[in-house]
Image (tube, rainbow, N blue to C red):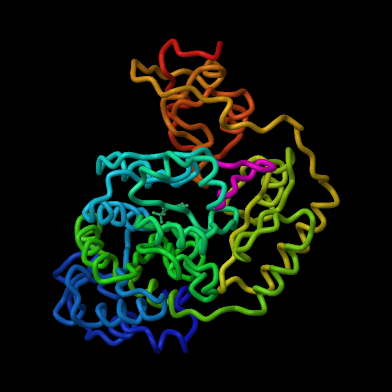
Amino acid sequence: MRAVFKDEEVLKNCKIAQMLQNQPPHLSFHTPGHKTAGWDITELDYSDNLASPTGCIAEAEKDIADILGACKSFILTDGSTAGVLSMLYAAKNMGAKRVLTSESAHKSVFNGCAALELELLLYPAKISKKIPLPHTMYELKCGYPSLLEVADALLFTSPDYYGNVADLAEIRKYCEQTKKMLLIDGAHGGHLHLDKEIYAGAYADMWVDGVHKSLPALTQGAVVSARTEKFAEALQKGVNIFRTTSPSYPIMASVEYAVKYPRNFELEKRAKDFAKSPRVYANEDWTKLCALFGENAFAVEKILQSEGIYAEFCDGNALCFYLSPATELADFERLKNRLERLFEQFPFTTDGKKESTEESRVEIVDGATEWLSLDEAVGMVSAEFCGLFPPCTPLISRGEIITGEKISLLKRATHTFGLKNEKIAVWKGAKKE
Ligand SMILES: Cc1ncc(COP(=O)(O)O)c(C=O)c1O
């Protein structure tokens, strides 16, 4: 635990960690079964209860809400996934029937809408130089007016995997004018409450902060928040359904610690300076350092791994390194120096193929599906969303004609989702003419 909770000053101010540090020594005849007590305990008379908090957890959630500018915040130990599902439940509880989002949203959005029987209104991702970009509000209004019109709730990912931030101020304005709910999946933006201009919580009705991705929290630590009492009430019902009944105390403590962790101005400055390199993707989120290697990206990833340097993900074009305020300056400098040498060794090369999204899809047909090997599936119509893991956004969407280029990416990826035994689900007989 010490390795995570390193900053004594922050720790002093953390209600859950203080409770855990000061707990009386006791014999454990309670869960969990390892029986060592320590920080990994359960709901005891002094440890409060996440499901109906009245003690240190209630205080921690109140502090978190104050820091995030929320009416109410809920600690999650089940990842941002539980937050997305809870928001969708709350939206439905408040009358939403149709949710508009991008095809590059996280799979939890698709799964949540399917499970809750919310109609998904999808618009295709806007790809530029192989990187999905958020649409501006203006582009959405011009490109998808009929989808916008019938949507009850709009759900945006901001920031995204590549550090792109949505057009939040304009989106908020539109949602206020049209009385639509605004949900933001900030799984990658837990640190942005330190920079309110691009923070989800400054705009959304409900939003998720995936604090474990960009702040020093344990994996699965997240927060979901509501702007007003009305949304908070509905969200409470959602978290009651989707949160585990056995929340981890170390994760809860780490969420509070992470939200209270201070900004690292020196690291931010160095990361922003490095991002001025033409070989680093110019984004709005300093924690996502995306180094552009084009076709050499997988080769460079292997070299770095052999030297003990691991990126968050490689998409076959960019190698994305994730920083946080807890990243050591020396580690950042080591990465930067190594990348600068690799930039010289591996010039940016692309296959020069035309990018396309819309022209390669067909109407989704209901019918029989079959699993084909990746090679056999080229030219067929995908029956599932699948892609690289991470980032866990669809590389191939349901209804999309499968191209050889995308199959080659899937084959080279270390981890994927949506495939089964190296096979891909397609609509039987549906084929590109
Ligand atoms: C945009 C986005 N939303 C939601 C999630 C789900 O987060 P978690 O893995 O913390 O459940 C992820 C995870 O990668 C994500 O990238």
Q: Observer-nearest residue: 74 or 356?
A: 356
Label tally: 0
- Residue occupying image coordinates x 31% and y 75%: 71
x and y percentages locating residue 248 in the rendered image? 29, 66
Q: Residue 288's quadrant in the figure?
A: bottom right
Identify the magenta region: 125-136
Q: Observer-nearest residue: 96 or 213?
A: 96
x and y percentages locating residue 232 in the rendered image? 26, 67
x and y percentages locating residue 424 in the rendered image? 46, 24
x and y percentages locating residue 250 in the rendered image? 34, 71
Above or below: residue 75 compared with residue 187? below
Above or below: residue 15 compared with residue 218? below
Q: Is residue 114 left or right of residue 295?
A: left
Query: Which quarter of the rendering shows the C terminus?
Result: top right
Extreme-right residue of the structure: 344
- Residue occupying image coordinates x 22% and y 86%: 24
Q: Is residue 423 left or right of residue 284?
A: left
Is 184 magenta? The answer is no
Q: Is residue 222 left or right of residue 287?
A: left
- Residue occupying image coordinates x 63% and y 53%: 320
